[in-house]
Amino acid sequence: MTRDYGIKIWADDNFIIKNNTINVNHKGQPSLLEITQTLRKKGYTGPLLLRFPHLIKKQISTLYKEFNRAIEEFDYHGKFQAVFPLKVNQFPNFVNALIEVSQEFNYGLEAGSKAELIIAMTHTPLGSPITVNGFKDKEMITLCFMAVSMGHNLTITIEGLGELQSIIEVQKENLTMPMPKIGMRIRLHSSGIGIWAKSGGYSSKFGLTSTELLEAYELLERNNLLEQLWMVHFHIGSQMSEINPLKKALREAGNIYADLKNRGAFALSALNIGGGLAVEYGQHSHKKEINYTLNEFANDVVFLIKEIAKNKGIEEPDIFTESGRFIAASHAVLIAPVLELFSQDYQEKALRLKTKNPPLIAELHALWQDLNRKNAREYLHDALDHMESLLTLFDLGYIDLEDRSNAEILVNLIIKKSLLLLSDGSQELLKLQNKIQERYLVNFSAFQSLADFWGLKQHFPLMPIDKLDKKATNPATLWDITCDSDGEIPFEEDAPLYLHDVNVHEEEYFLAFFLTGAYQEVLGMKHNLFTHPTEVTVEFDEQGAFKLTNIIEAQNILDVLEDFNYDKELLKSRLNLPNEALRHKLKLYLNENSYLKTVLALN
Ligand SMILES: *Cc1c(COP(=O)(O)O)cnc(C)c1O
């Protein structure tokens, strides 16, 4: 059994294991442990969200590099252009880093709401593309016109005929204002695949049917606006695990594009293939989520569009993408301290053996003592058998609570010992691991920090950041600190997680959750009033040393309550304590965040 936590599968060389720690594979290669401890020393407790701008840059430049390579290889005549869809992550320390690292690429932003549009208008470098998708009212369309007046290169993607009518109205009311470019989102009969496939297909929320497309075309023609129509857009859904649905969608969209162009949409010159590039979240080779590489993806897109253009006798359009998950996921890592291990009491020192024990207990004890590689399987079966009998004896009143506790501990010890001796990966052993799993109470909220795990059972790679030179043998279930049983990442027999046996009263033990930079932050919810964790940007200086910037501490208790429209002053006035010392202590507590403190952090 490998204990590299599948790092070769999901880490994309962004992180490497060095001796006992997992390290950032960049510049001075600091370990996540060093970074975490630096933050702890500054007084930040609770979970920590680390942002790595160099990983945003890597994704953007890889995307451009692969497409530009394919364009050259196939002698394609259009350009490659891309925007980042803001809905994937609108947090300022992400967006600012994204803008900073993408300067050389003419990379833009995609907005889907008025607030996102304001981010796009204030952050996109003039000239870089802004695309505006989603449902829009007249006010939002007017905002788009304003952006163009500011000098932005903006495209409104229309999702329905009503929007086009509004655009025409706004244009007529503001004849002096320059007009945004227009894109048409098409409703494909092809759809995506997997849990996020709903954005495509006939029943999708978005896009124009063939009939509507023709009407839209005529409406533009009648209003002399065909010169604004430059883009055809589709999006078949997120996290495309296979490439075939995209190929089908491309053929469909390519033919629609070509038809519109040949019909007279002379300004058409871009095909926007939406987002959907998948991220490998799998931690076990049989749980991989993607069956293609970016290289293959870019080749397929460029080749297919080239072919359609040739067949239909049109110029090759610029290729636009709006991949978000692919750009943002890897940049954020959540570090969460383990607060406690449950079932640690199944230890030898917890035994309360009597001078005279019931025969079956004495026998269990002997089995445990004498267990070796040769007899392990037999003894294990005997022990499981005895356990059944002992539970029956307890129900009938023949043995007492102490005996029962001894039986549980001994059987647990026997299972653990035999698993170590018999690591043959057999079904029976894997099943037994369920019995001896440890529950790790982890200082984070799955609802706040891994929303897609809660909502869609999306797996995120996770591992301890320390002790990697030691074999982790505890089959582990993780509990978050919300009072909700959905906040549990259960041990899975077919994708087991093993963690170390640690005494968190003596040393801190941290888990890292990777690839949390896309969607999780903004989908995160304040269940039990646990808020966005303390975040920090990890940058590197010339010498390669890391520096921590943009630290934003998790909201304190009073501020969270104020966000929920509680009156802070009223709350304070009601928290009436009899003496100054208590009042002082309470004041400190209220100014801290809701997350728990590890025993060590409390001391
Ligand atoms: C959500 C969305 C995207 C981004 O999808 P990813 O899977 O994150 O790449 C792109 N385009 C549109 C229209 C979207 O709604």
Image (cartoon, grey):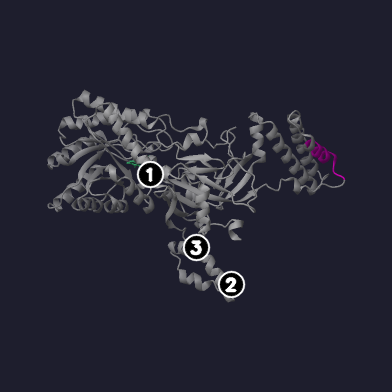
Is residue 303 left or right of 575 when viewed as pictured?
left
Judge the density around disc 2: few (<14), some (14-19), many (≥20) Cα neighbours within 10 Å.
few
Considering only vertical position in the picture, is 383 above or below 587? above
Q: Percent from the top left, x then y, of residue 148? A: 20, 50
Instruction: Please provide the residue range marked out in magenta.
Output: 356-367
Asked whether residue 583 is drawn in magenta, I would say no
Tell me the amino acid under the disc marked 1. Answer: Ile
Q: Earlier in the sequence, mark 3 or mark 2?
A: 3
Q: Percent from the top left, x then y, of residue 458? A: 48, 40
Q: Secondary structure at mark 3?
A: helix
Tell me the amino acid under the disc marked 2. Answer: Leu
Q: Residue at x 49, y 48 (%)?
A: 334
Decide if residue 361 is in sight here: yes
Quarter of the image with the C terminus is bottom right
Q: Percent from the top left, x then y, of residue 387? A: 76, 38
Kindly check if marks 2 and 1 are in contact, taking CB atoms under 8 A apart as contact: no
Q: Residue at x 47, y 36 (%)?
A: 10
Is residue 473 left or right of 562 when viewed as pictured?
right
Quarter of the image with the N terminus is top right
Numbered circle sitting on residue 56: 1
Mark 1 beta carbon near ligand 1 (under 8 Å): no
Is residue 114 left or right of 353 when viewed as pictured?
left
Write down the residue under mark 3.
557
Task: Single out the mark in the foreground, 2 or 1.
Answer: 1
Q: Nearer the viewer, residue 213 or 238?
A: 238
Q: Quadrant of ligand 1?
A: top left
Q: Residue at x 54, y 71 (%)?
A: 575
Q: Earlier in the sequence, mark 2 or mark 1?
A: 1
Numbered circle sitting on residue 582: 2
* C-alpha distance separating marks 2 and 1: 47 Å
Q: Percent from the top left, x then y, of residue 208? A: 26, 38
